[in-house]
Image: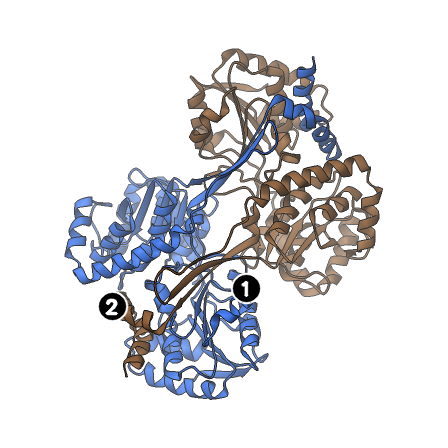
Chain colours: A brown, B blue
């Protein structure tokens, strides 16, 4: 089933699987966007009827949200609250201060950190509810100080899972709308009579949602277009095959394009893991999906040592990176390209997906070379400002004019000199 | 020539001009990218011959750079050095620290700020040289700790302006290549025998460069696709028409799609500025361009008061925003959406373009609602990590498993429980 390679036998770009965009999605989505722009709420109501068999009002009322919250098992609410507290604790540390420079006479400069005004979060619906998505997106936006956090999610047969609504309440969402798919993204980007246009759209979704985000990018900001999920596990000979296999399967069960890769310097571990995978696959509720992922995309790569294994990670910049060794902090400095790093043998990726505190929206497909996990920064912007007094400007006016002249931009220079000349008059 | 409107007479989305992409650019660029990917350096040499009449080697040698530096007027070098020092001073304050959380027993979490490894800067060539572009892009990358800053710029007739090379030396660029256009962007994105692939491409350029950046986006990161440049000047009745007109023209001379807008609560100023524009236009070397910009895109908008004027700015989120009043800091809090803000009557935009210190690469077309000026952040990424001990994990394992079960992701839960169960055995 799963294949084992020696280091160098598989090219870095072939390590993770890629999804193909289904044909015709582009045209379907652009038509949906046009329709929402033209018909507004009426279009959304039509799509709700057609795709979700829902005749419910577009907006979920505060009473419905409160009722949903009360209907959820209190034990689960407690877990959600604890996860939210952890997420809040971690993300609060990401808050940035504005700064101001005023060391030179007559000159003030600074950078002001300002929250974006409205954020839209797309939450997938359908067979399963993902309260973790709600928490991981709402909390950083809330900490950033976003005035309005707006959730859209499809209401299949008119219903939204109560646990989603509970998570939205815990996460600090302000308004929730029953709309799904590309039409929800269109509504968030352009606004309708009921749904306000936002400045940034975040959250995962199917191919239609992803394509819609791509098409409205520029009109609004988006978090990212996520590719299939990936994990790279570096494990040494002291690791237990049962545990390593369990971690690989936690990734593989996402969908058949997910990739779980083990890189190890231990031939014994490399040999034992496939049997463990097989054993555990048989009892998994999502066996079919996990098996497809492991068989098509799963890989075991044998290296000489742990350092080389980490270098592979740096080269491919995995979304999730587990470093399962006894002394993981020895290597922290060596790790340069990864979305989220799970250090040691007791930090499975699933802990980060739900509970630990760091974000679970992560750069995929090698983009961790330059992209970052979702954070408070995604919901703020930095604005620069400068201030000069008449004297401070006069002192450097000739230099600015000389620089501008060098670039052939005479009017630039004049705008500085006109002030100096008036002062001297 | 320039039209005057009352507040509300012009829709926010009609205030700034837009450029249209010339036809066929998309196909031409995608063919160039394919050719560079296939033929590497050989393709670059062919394009250099064809577009720039250059047979020079692709890379500029360190000796050539030193020689260019020595050939530039020492007075200009001094101005560049002073501007660079100001830019360095401002951007150094943007540096971010990593953080670590270790308040709970057996749990360590953190966020590591890591520079991207290689950055590519496109510098336009042709009739004028833009040393300010070199400084504004190289310095933040250098402060971020990028290992290799790579410049590409077309060498028209084999030549690169010495002042560009001098600016590259001052800014801390590591390698400079003679390549322009879409082919330069392709080389930076995919690498050739001589030019290394980079993680992020920054810098301005013509329609071909912009389209190429758009097409390689995802393979590498890019700074932004800049639209035409804009300024919104809010000025009250105490401002001098001559000065306001000079600032408008400093924007208008960029190109005919540039927009300069004055918003004022003073009918006298609104009436006096058009005459001043006409007077100053007549003596501008770039009169034709500036006149086209003023006539087609220039606007004067009359408001009741300064607060309303600032609200217009917030609504359209201008790239450059001048607030020409005596007490600009009274309003700093009210300003929410703008790229770079120039406060008071003695801080013309040109000062920021060249000399003050804040960056001049700014979000255009209303994207300042969610985008930021180029900064040190653009050249770093944040990597999260977590670490749990066996005991710390065991304590919360059941909660994570319960949360995972709620989302129907059984293998996620198992990856946590398998560790707890082994510990209890």
Spot occupied by residue B247 in the image (x, y as percentages of width and height): 38, 75
B279 or B322: which is nearer to us? Answer: B322
One can see residue B313 in this view: yes
Which quarter of the rendering shows the N terminus of chain B?
A: bottom left
Which quarter of the rendering shows the C terminus of chain B?
A: top right
- Quick check: A6 left or right of B355? right
Spot occupied by residue A229 in the image (x, y as percentages of width and height): 58, 35
Spot occupied by residue B31 in the image (x, y as percentages of width and height): 40, 49
Task: Quadrant for residue B422, please give it.
Answer: top right
Q: At 66% across and 50% down in the image, what residue appears?
A: A121
Task: Quadrant for residue B345, please give it.
Answer: bottom left
Count of number-bearing discs: 2
Chain of residue at mark 1: B
In the image, is residue A260 above or below residue A141?
above
Spot occupied by residue A21 in the image (x, y as percentages of width and height): 59, 42
Q: At 27% across and 44% down in the image, what residue appears?
A: B175
Q: Secondary structure at mark 1?
A: loop
The answer as to whether the residues below labels 2 and 1 share one chain is no
Q: At 15% across and 54% down in the image, what residue appears?
A: B70
In the image, is residue B208 above or below residue B41?
below
One can see residue A24 in this view: no
Chain of residue at mark 2: A
- Quick check: B338 left or right of B147? right
- Quick check: B194 left or right of A279? left
Q: Residue furthest top?
A: A268
- Name the residue tied to disc 1: B336
Crowding at label 2, few (<14), some or many (≥20) Cα neighbours within 10 Å?
Answer: some
Crowding at label 1, few (<14), some or many (≥20) Cα neighbours within 10 Å?
Answer: many
Q: At 46% across and 48% down in the image, what residue appears?
A: B217
- What numbered label is drawn on residue A402? 2
- What numbered label is drawn on residue B127? none
B30 or A364: which is nearer to us? Answer: A364
């Amino acid at each position: 089933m799963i294949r084992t390679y020696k280091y160098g036998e598989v090219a870095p770009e072939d390590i993770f699987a890629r999804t193909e965009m289904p044909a015709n999605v582009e045209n379907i989505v652009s038509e949906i966007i046009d329709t929402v722009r033209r018909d507004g709420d009426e279009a959304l109501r039509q799509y709700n009827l057609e795709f979700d068999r829902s005749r419910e009002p577009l907006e979920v009322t505060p009473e419905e949200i409160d009722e949903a919250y009360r209907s959820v098992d209190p034990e689960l609410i407690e877990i959600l609250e604890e996860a939210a507290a952890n997420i809040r604790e971690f993300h609060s540390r990401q808050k940035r201060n504005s700064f101001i420079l005023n060391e030179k006479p007559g000159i003030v400069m600074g950078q002001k950190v300002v929250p974006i005004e409205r954020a839209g979060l797309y939450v997938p619906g359908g067979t399963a509810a993902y309260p973790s998505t709600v928490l991981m997106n709402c909390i950083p936006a809330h900490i950033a100080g976003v005035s309005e956090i707006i959730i859209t999610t499809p209401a299949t047969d008119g219903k939204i899972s109560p646990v989603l609504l509970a998570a939205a309440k815990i996460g600090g969402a302000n308004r929730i709308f029953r709309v799904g798919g590309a039409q929800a993204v269109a509504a968030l980007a352009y606004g309708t009579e009921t749904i306000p246009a936002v400045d940034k759209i975040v959250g995962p979704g199917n191919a239609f949602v992803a394509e819609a985000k791509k098409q409205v990018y520029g009109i609004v900001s988006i978090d990212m277009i996520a590719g299939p999920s990936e994990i790279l596990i570096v494990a040494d000979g002291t690791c237990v095959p049962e545990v390593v296999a369990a971690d690989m399967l936690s990734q593989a069960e996402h969908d058949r394009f997910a990739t779980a890769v083990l890189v190890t310097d231990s031939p014994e571990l490399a040999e034992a893991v496939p049997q463990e995978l097989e054993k555990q696959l048989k009892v998994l509720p999502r066996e079919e999906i996990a098996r497809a992922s492991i068989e098509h995309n799963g890989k075991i790569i044998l290296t000489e040592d742990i350092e080389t294994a980490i270098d592979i990670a740096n080269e491919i910049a995995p979304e999730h990176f587990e470093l399962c060794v006894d002394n993981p902090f020895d290597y922290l400095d060596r790790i340069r390209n990864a979305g989220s790093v799970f250090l040691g043998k007791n930090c499975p990726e699933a802990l980060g997906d739900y509970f630990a505190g760091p974000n679970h929206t992560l750069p995929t497909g090698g983009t961790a070379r330059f992209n970052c996990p979702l954070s408070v920064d995604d919901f703020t912007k930095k604005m620069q400002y400068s201030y000069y007094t008449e004297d401070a400007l006069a002192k450097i006016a000739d230099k600015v004019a000389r620089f501008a002249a060098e670039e052939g931009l005479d009017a630039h220079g004049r705008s500085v000199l006109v002030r100096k000349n008036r002062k001297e008059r």
